[in-house]
Amino acid sequence: MKSKRVDDHILMLLAIKPPGKLVELDHILEKVGRNSGSSREEIISTLKDLIKQGLVMMRENKYSITEEGRRKAWSLVYDPDMVLSYRLVLLARFYYPKISGLILPFLKNRPVSVVKVFSDENDPINKIKPIFSRYKKAKPKIYNFINTRDDLMRYVDMHAIDFIPYVHKLNQNHPDWLVIDIDAGEAIKNAGSLGFNLIKEVTKETYIIMNDILNLNPCIKFSGSRGFQIWVSFIKPLGNFDDYRKSISVIRDLVENSIKGKIDDLKEKYGSLISEPLTTSTVAKKEKRKNQILLDPSSMKEEGDVRAPWSMHHKTGLVSVPVHFSNLEKFTPDNARVEIVVENHEYLQEAFHLEPSDPSKLIKYLGKGGLLKFIS
């Protein structure tokens, strides 16, 4: 008896290939047989049916998907019975051509780490095997550079869906951006929507401190998973990598001081999720900060990298999307689905204009020793 899903598995496999790519029968038999449990005879019979329906074409004894077949495959992109890595790559194929002009400014002229996704051999339906590629091991290192739309799509053709640029250009001794990764400990992450709202509270507080107290021009983006990032660029470098890390400690101290004045209200709202101190900028073992929210300075180093605005997150398939400060409180991860981001990209791009900031106020707080001298 023919598997009722073998046709869908064939369409998904062919849909993730580059347009016009011809696929050998043996490859289809191997992958679809593994994914659907179908026999050789079932797969070949189904291929014939798909050709009759105009969903697949055959040339030179090889197979490719038609545009109608690609549309049918797209309807399966959130189907949990389909191979997870295929669904992610299909999302990337739909998404990146439409927003390439938005992500490329954050990738150009610097090394880019990429995450390629493939199927987990033991559980291809539910799990992926991510491959994190920073550079090819050679002397000198061979980095990934993505400067054009064609470059971007060439990496998508290789199953790259997540783009994580270095925070600096080659041989540069300072980052181009100050990036604060706001990430919660496990106890807060595991608290569902209540924990997510608490992360948003700290993100809001951090933004206000940076905007109102330090006179910076911060931009917020969703991480693509469960946190947020705040980015700033400067009219002149703040200093070296160490100065950027210290500045995040300064900002964290300002945030924590502000939170202290609101701690009773936060406890009433979030109960046992609130610990004191609530925030930290010390990247300690996860167990030690499970009840805290980390303002993470880790990317502020040589060869430090950070997920680009507009990149998909390889674990969730959600977009690391810009968020207007005015929309932060009502933001949910559903707002980061690729089709929603594509639909709203013109409005969303207004949230991430990295207008260069004057760092003089922040430098005063840093002081000569790079520590908070001006707060009791």
Image (spheres, helix red, strand yellow):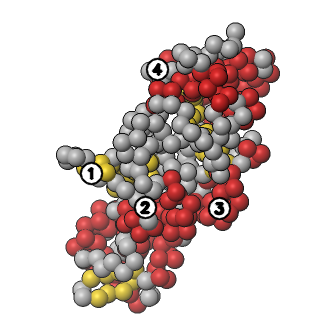
Please name the residue shown 56% across and 17% down the image. 368
Please name the residue shown 36% across and 81% down the image. 20
Q: Which residue is mark 2?
A: 147
CB atoms of marks 4 and 3 within 8 Å:
no
Secondary element at tag 1: strand
Expressed as whole percent of the image width and height from the top left, the position of residue 110 reads 41, 51
The C terminus, quarter of image: top right
Image quarter for residue 87? Answer: bottom left
Of labels 1 and 4, earlier in sequence is 1
Q: Report the front residue among 275 and 322.
A: 322
Q: Amino acid at mark 2?
A: Asn
Q: Amino acid at mark 1?
A: Ile
Q: Is residue 50 left or right of residue 369?
A: left
As measured in the structure, the alpha-carbon distance from the residue carrying label 4 to the one carrying label 3 is 37 Å
Of labels 1 and 2, earlier in sequence is 1
Q: Amino acid at mark 3?
A: His
Secondary element at tag 4: loop
Expressed as whole percent of the image width and height from the top left, the position of residue 27 reads 25, 70
For label 2, count other residues whose C-alpha is less than 10 Å away and answer few (under 14), some (14-19) or many (20+). some
Q: Which residue is mark 3?
A: 345
CB atoms of marks 2 and 3 within 8 Å:
no
Q: Which mark is residue 284?
A: 4
Expressed as whole percent of the image width and height from the top left, the position of residue 146 reads 40, 59
Please name the residue shown 70% across and 30% down the image. 214
Q: Which residue is mark 1?
A: 142
Q: Is 369 above or below relative to 295?
A: above
As measured in the structure, the alpha-carbon distance from the residue carrying label 3 to the one carrying label 1 is 33 Å
Q: Is 305 above or below relative to 241?
A: below
As measured in the structure, the alpha-carbon distance from the residue carrying label 1 to the one carrying label 4 is 32 Å
Question: Can see residue 76?
Answer: no
Secondary element at tag 3: helix
Secondary element at tag 2: loop
